[in-house]
Amino acid sequence: MTNIRSIAIPPLTADLERVLIDADTIQRRVIEMANQINHDYAGITEPLVLVGILKGSFIFLADLCRKLTVPHVVDFIAVSSYGKGSTSTGNVRLVMDTRENLEKHHVLIVEDILDTGYTLDYLVRNLKARGTRSVNTAVLLEKPDRHKVEVHLQYVGFTIPDVWVVGYGLDYGEQYRTLPYIAEMKIPG
Ligand code: PRP
């Protein structure tokens, strides 16, 4: 039988500059964030609705929700803003809605990265307008140098410099999402 502790961490490929945040560090921080969420939502009488923003949040959400002890349910939403480029256009569009009706629910939006802030700014306003009881945000990574709009973040994993990052849900042309660490991409040129 395979010893799960012996599963190899995939090595950096030629396209990747360096590991920015290793897998153990991510896991430790996710537990800390979950502990804080458990503390803050202790005593809620109905499940907290975790809304993951597809696709980038799926691994962070999967790890985070399995460390939660407060009652919760999982849902997803998808928006489009980058098109085929690498910079947000600011023109955010809902392309897939949640399955749950969020009215009167406590909602926690779960996001992999806050870059310009356009995506979260749009979604916080959109979900608040639905008569939700509360809307908070849990973001694994944020790049302060890139913010174009200010979004209040309740839970932040790591603040990172303005470099292109992949892994742990984040992609470059749909590649690298399943790396267990966050790596910095080499910028071609
Ligand atoms: C990325 C990321 C965030 C958003 C953040 O999504 O996952 O959702 O951009 O950028 P912003 O703060 O500038 O709005 P992307 O559009 O690349 O889709 P993906 O999650 O499917 O990779």
Image: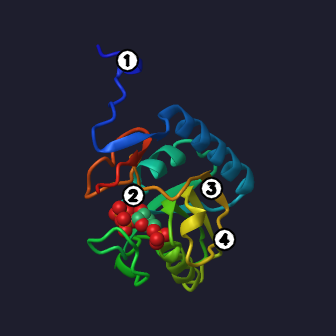
Does residue 89 sit above or below 9 in this rendering? Answer: below
Element assignment for label 1: helix
C-alpha span from label 3 to label 1: 30 Å
Residue 74 got which mark? none
Q: Residues at badges 3 and 2 in contact (C-beta under 8 Å)?
A: no
C-alpha span from label 4 to label 2: 20 Å
Which residue position holds label 4?
A: 152
Residue 156 got which mark? 3
Residue at position x 40%, y 75% in the image: 88
N-terminal of the pair, mark 3 or mark 1, is 1
Residue 138: quadrant of the picture: bottom right
Element assignment for label 2: loop
The amino acid type of the residue labelled 4 equals: His
N-terminal of the pair, mark 3 or mark 2, is 2
Which residue position holds label 2?
A: 56
The amino acid type of the residue labelled 3 equals: Val
CB of residue at label 2: within 8 Å of ligand 1?
A: yes
Asked whether 1 or 166 is in front, the reply is 166
Residue 6 got which mark? 1
Residue at position x 44%, y 82% in the image: 90
The amino acid type of the residue labelled 1 equals: Ser
Element assignment for label 4: loop
C-alpha span from label 3 to label 2: 15 Å
